[in-house]
Image (spheres, rainbow, N blue to C red):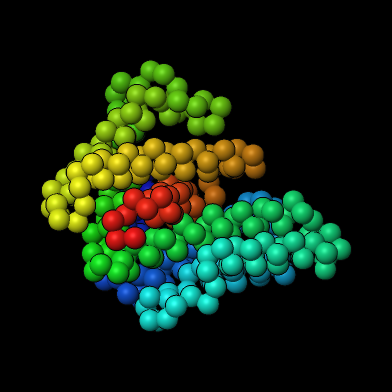
Amino acid sequence: MKQRLITGLWAGALFLGLTLLGGWGYHLLLTAMALIGLYEFIKMTKTPPIGTAAAIAYAALIGFMIPWRLLDRSPIFSFEQGMWLLLLLFLLLTVFTKNRVNIGAAALLFVGTVYIGTGFAYMAASRAAGDGHGIYWTFLLLCCIWGSDAGAYFVGRAVGRNKLWPAISPNKTVEGAAGGVLIAMIIAVVFWLFHTDLFSAGRALLIGLSCAVVGQLGDLVQSAYKRVYGIKDSGSLLPGHGGILDRCDSWLIVFPFVHLMTLMPYM
């Protein structure tokens, strides 16, 4: 418990400090987290973390994280073009390696790169929002996610009776999940009260609901694939907390979801 607390304090201070500062420091932190997360994913799926296949994945992830707004440049490729080119590279890899990297490994690398790359890219996009309120949007989403996690945990411990999905995550309860949704929606409304000019109360409730529901699904997604590989944590970078993917599982789903579903008013 002591190690967990110490790790949480220094990691939290570093992350929150650079989030407040924004700019290149925050972007480089997210890029480092994304690369470590991808390394954890590749290693977990039994793919060699060093080699041609992994190198393509790392390079593609860096492509996701290029800070076009900070560079005051437009992306070279559209999102659709980038996705298709990455898919093509992994498919061609199966040919040029004569199936030493087979279609199963290529598919896993493609999924992992897109899953982690889009998640961290949209975290960066939130902080660099063009309306000048990036720090507000970033903390709105993070606080809704954290509030949902805390609400699900404490409500589940207090009144949880019915298991949510015991085959995937045996400790989660329906009551806890509902508590997490309620807390996230309250947090979103509180944020709205400080900036009623930016979006409506209805939009705030929808954002809070999305953060809670999609965030909890993101947690279940990671629980599901870790069970496939028989591991408890994705990594050991953060003693007492696991790896980057363990700490960011909800973030990786929530940030792309609220952007791609155009729930963020500045989109």
Viewer can see residue 168: yes
User: Could you tell me which residue is drawn at 30 percent across and 45 percent down?
Assistant: 207
From the top left corner, tell me how far across and down residue 50 is, in percent. Answer: 68, 67
As rendered, which of 130 and 232 lies closer to the eye?
130
User: Could you tell me which residue is drawn at 53 percent across and 43 percent down?
Assistant: 222
As rendered, which of 172 and 174 lies closer to the eye?
174
27 left or right, relative to 52:
left
User: Could you tell me which residue is drawn at 42 percent across and 38 percent down?
Assistant: 216
Viewer can see residue 247: no
Q: How many marks?
A: 0
From the top left corner, tell me how far across and down residue 199 is, in percent. Answer: 21, 52
Q: Quadrant of residue 229?
A: top right
As rendered, which of 89 and 40 lies closer to the eye?
89
210 left or right, relative to 140:
right
Q: Quadrant of residue 148?
A: top left
Is the residue 65 above or below the residue 162 in the image? below
Quarter of the image with the N terminus in it: top left
From the top left corner, tell me how far across and down residue 51 is, in percent. Answer: 72, 69
As rendered, which of 10 and 62 lies closer to the eye?
62
From the top left corner, tell me how far across and down residue 154 is, in percent. Answer: 30, 31
Q: Which residue reaches farthest top?
A: 161
User: Could you tell me which residue is drawn at 56 percent across and 58 percent down?
Assistant: 114
Quarter of the image with the C terminus in it: bottom left
